[in-house]
Amino acid sequence: MKVLLSIKPEFVEQITNGNKKFEYRKKIFKEEVDTVVVYSNMPVGKLVGEFKIGTIIKGTPEEIWKQTYPNAGVPEDFFRSYFSNREEAFAIEIKDFKAYPEPLDPKEVFGRFTAPQSYMYIDDEVAK
């Protein structure tokens, strides 16, 4: 199964150039997911690629940062702010990112589209 994640354009760039090897989340999927489709938030507003999920690490924000910071692709102050007042954090390992040859307009792929706050399950055939 695939899931769509909304990611800020500056972090999508870090994924694309290989500096960001983990995507951080406050909540994780309830279904079994193997692929993430990346939606680059506005001002880009496009589906830009996808990656396979490696390991999903669960722990306190402190534990997650210690395990992942060399490949975080985000500043530590951003990470700490994102997980402030949280006891649990998740790090999704990014494997084999593949940029689409041309970014896709999600309205052409899904019809009606609103970027998800957290994540959105999608059909495996979408965005191939």
Image: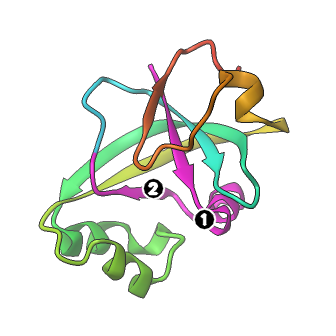
Q: Which residue is mark 2?
A: 23
Residue 127 visible to the viewer: no
- In percent of width and height, residue 124 lies at 55, 15
Residue at the image point whose x is 64% and y is 55% from the top:
41
Q: Residue furthest right?
A: 102
- In percent of width and height, residue 110 lies at 65, 23
Q: Which residue is mark 1?
A: 11
Residue 60 visible to the viewer: yes
Q: How many marks?
A: 2
Residue at the image point whose x is 63% and y is 37% from the top:
50
Helix or strand or loop: what does disc 1 sit on?
helix
Pointer 1 local density, CA inside 10 Å: few below 14, some 14–19, many at least 20: some
Quarter occupied by residue 80: bottom left
- In percent of width and height, residue 106 lies at 70, 33
What residue span does the magenta drawing correspond to? 1-27
Q: Nearer the viewer, residue 82 or 62?
A: 82
Q: Nearer the viewer, residue 68 or 44?
A: 44
Tell me the kind of residue under disc 1. Answer: Phe
Q: Residue furthest left?
A: 87
